[in-house]
Image: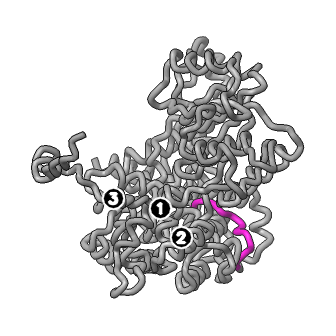
């Protein structure tokens, strides 16, 4: 046997031919795992914010009342797929001591690891968003009849089930109605309304809730501790708010937030998180709201422009204003201890705002901002739309509260009483009537206008208001001012309901101009120098129009003339004669003047 040693391998040539294959003996360094995957719940106890679902499933498993199909619905990132895998593990849980379905996944069972990695042969996961056809469902249904290979149940997890076609749903129905004993179905969807009711009726449904902001903030705080990261509590609260109840979105944002600072710089601050999220400074937005509601419109517009220059999105700024008005309304309704999820100094400022506004005013402001948010999103110049929204808000804040407007329209004296105490409902939480109220009047105004006897029971302080004192005087003013268009519309379309010096309400006819109340209000302000409260409401019961009144008076005068003895005799002497018109005799002064003129001639 030849004992000559073999020549050593030419490692240099090998490296030249196969570069990159000389991996270290220790193996590859594991890559970074994002927080959303690293901290995916491994047990039902790890699920946050879904206590009702966990309690129901726990009782069902303990009683042996396990459904054959589950429907999990909720917004993105609340844990639908994670819950589906946990249910699959619970159905197939098996250890040396336990061989039955169990919700207590405190230790890893024989099938748990493979199911968690989506690698178990008896647990099939299908994404209905990419496999929508009936052929994909038939492929699954053909395997349903066969017993599981190693687990207790064959579990089919179908994500985004609402994406299945109609024919695919129809193919699934029969199997869902009478499934084999060894088969279980778990569906997940974000669009529950798109799932046919025939499928829903065959499933046990669980609605996974959005995670509460405080609960989510606590969860992020715990994860920061496990990761050895430091982020200020206010910064975590901003992340929770931006995530809108989605745990996955919150963890993805936390991944970004952690790298905003370093160990040398200290904890990641709330301003750093705010800059990362692209949010305007919410404290400055609260300044903007305070300036707007106190009539400092110039300061408010300057603050809005400054926020925009600093990178604030007009849509986000408007939405923050909406949030603050909502929070102020909650303080007004529930008191200073209302759960707002805001910092203590912010809550104190909101309490101060709530003391100066009624609940009706806050409701009106909410509606203005809600409409303004749509305008800002759709406008070609978002900043201009946001400025107009702020101006509308300032204008609404300067108007009297709805309950005060109701008293004015009813002719009752204005009250100087302070706004109602927090926690006490506003007597008329509805938009205030203005000159542009159109046909939408608050219910409180209806009651005030239709119950004049209540107003007469109150001691009234008469305030001298220049201008017409009666409905007839108003129509006379329109004739004297020669505003033919407004006079014609007022005569044809207005049924007067209530008239007081300084206020007028009427029932418009169906084809009345929609801007009639606004036009009348502008003219009265121009002619009298006083601001009149004009209300046009189709729900009121008004009297006859001026035109109807004129026709009625004309008919009454004709009838009165027919009953006159001289006219009756004239009609008898001239058969076929008719009364065409009735004219009043000229005044005495006019007759004397005419006679004098004739004598001189």
Q: Are marks 2 and 3 in contact (CB under 8 Å)?
A: no
Q: Is residue 427 magenta?
A: yes
Q: Nearer the viewer, residue 144 or 179?
A: 144
Q: Nearer the viewer, residue 567 or 44?
A: 44
Q: Which residue is painted at 83% across and 44% down in the image?
A: 60
Q: Give above or below for 298 relative to 132.
A: below
Residue pointed to by mark 3: 25
Query: How many residues crowd around disc 2 within 10 Å: few (fewer than 14), some, or many (20 or more)?
Result: some
Helix, strand or loop under label 2: helix
Question: In the rendered image, which residue does mark 1 sit on?
Answer: 35
Q: Earlier in the sequence, mark 1 or mark 2?
A: 1
Q: Which mark is residue 223?
A: 2
Left of 252 or right of it: where is 1? left
Question: How far across and down, in percent of the image, does residue 66 sit?
Answer: 81, 37
| Of marks 3 and 1, the one in the foreground | 3
Q: CA distance from mark 1 to mark 2?
A: 9 Å
The alpha-carbon separation of the residues under discs 2 and 3 comes to: 33 Å
Q: Which residues are magenta?
A: 422-432
Q: As rendered, which of 343 and 550 lies closer to the eye?
A: 343
- The disc at residue 214 is none
Return the disc, 2 or 3, that comes first in the chain's sequence.
3
355, 275: nearer the viewer: 275
Q: Earlier in the sequence, mark 3 or mark 1?
A: 3
**Direction from residue 98 to residue 271 in the image, left or right:** left
Q: Is residue 410 visible?
A: yes
Residue 59: x and y in percent read 85, 48
Q: CA distance from mark 3 to mark 1?
A: 29 Å
Whether residue 588 is visible: no
């Amino acid at each position: 046997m030849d004992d000559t040693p073999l020549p050593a391998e030419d490692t240099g040539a090998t490296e030249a031919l196969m570069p990159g294959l000389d991996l270290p003996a220790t193996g590859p360094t594991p890559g970074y795992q994002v927080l959303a995957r690293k901290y995916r719940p491994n047990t039902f106890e790890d699920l946050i914010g879904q206590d009702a679902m966990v309690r129901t499933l726990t009782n069902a498993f303990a009683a042996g009342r396990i459904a054959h199909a589950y429907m999990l619905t909720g917004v993105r990132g609340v844990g639908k797929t994670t819950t589906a895998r946990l249910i699959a593990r619970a159905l197939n849980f098996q250890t040396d001591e336990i061989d039955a379905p169990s919700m207590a996944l405190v230790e890893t069972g024989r099938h748990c690891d493979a199911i968690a990695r989506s690698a178990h042969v008896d647990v099939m996961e299908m994404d209905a968003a990419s496999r929508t056809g009936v052929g994909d469902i038939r492929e699954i249904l053909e395997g349903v009849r066969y017993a599981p290979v190693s687990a207790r149940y064959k579990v089919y997890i179908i994500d985004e089930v609402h994406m299945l076609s109609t024919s695919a749903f129809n193919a699934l129905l029969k199997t869902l109605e009478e499934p084999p004993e060894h088969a279980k179905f778990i569906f997940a969807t974000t669009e529950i309304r798109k799932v046919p009711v025939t499928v829903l009726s065959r499933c046990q449904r669980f609605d996974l809730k959005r995670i509460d902001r405080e609960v989510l903030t606590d969860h992020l705080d715990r994860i920061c501790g496990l990761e050895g990261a430091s982020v200020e509590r206010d910064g975590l609260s901003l992340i929770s708010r931006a995530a809108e109840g989605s745990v996955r979105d919150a963890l993805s944002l936390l991944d970004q937030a952690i790298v905003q600072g370093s160990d040398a710089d200290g904890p990641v601050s709330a301003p750093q998180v705010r800059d990362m999220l692209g949010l305007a400074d919410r404290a400055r937005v609260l300044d903007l709201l305070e300036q707007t509601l106190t009539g400092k419109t110039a300061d408010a517009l300057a603050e809005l422009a400054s926020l925009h220059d600093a990178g604030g999105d007009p849509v986000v700024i408007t939405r923050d204003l909406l949030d603050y008005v909502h929070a102020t309304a909650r303080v007004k309704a529930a008191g200073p201890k209302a759960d707002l999820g805001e910092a203590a100094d912010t809550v104190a400022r909101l309490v101060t705002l709530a003391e100066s506004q009624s609940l009706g005013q806050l409701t009106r402001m909410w509606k203005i901002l809600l409409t303004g948010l749509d305008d800002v999103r759709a406008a070609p110049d978002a900043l201009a739309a946001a400025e107009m929204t702020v101006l509308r808000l300032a204008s609404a804040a300067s108007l009297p509260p709805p309950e005060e407007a109701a008293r004015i329209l009813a002719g009752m004296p204005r009250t100087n009483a302070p706004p109602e105490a927090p926690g006490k409902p506003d007597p008329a939480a509805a938009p205030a009537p203005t000159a542009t109220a159109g046909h939408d009047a608050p219910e409180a105004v209806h009651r005030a206008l239709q119950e004049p006897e209540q107003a007469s029971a109150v001691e009234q302080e008469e305030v001298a208001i220049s201008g017409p004192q009666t409905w007839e005087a108003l129509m006379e003013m329109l004739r004297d001012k020669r505003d033919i268009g407004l006079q014609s519309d007022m005569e044809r379309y207005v049924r007067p309901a209530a008239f007081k010096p300084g206020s007028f309400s009427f029932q418009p006819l169906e084809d009345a101009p929609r801007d009639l109340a606004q036009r009348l209000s502008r003219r009265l302000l121009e002619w009298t120098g006083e601001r009149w409260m004009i209300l046009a409401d189709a729900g009121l019961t008004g009297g006859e129009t001026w035109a109807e009144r004129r026709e009625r008076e004309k008919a009454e005068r004709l009838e009165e003339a027919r009953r006159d003895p001289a006219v009756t005799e004239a009609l008898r002497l001239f058969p076929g004669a008719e009364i065409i018109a009735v004219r009043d005799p000229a005044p005495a002064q006019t007759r004397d003047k005419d006679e004098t003129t004739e004598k001189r001639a």
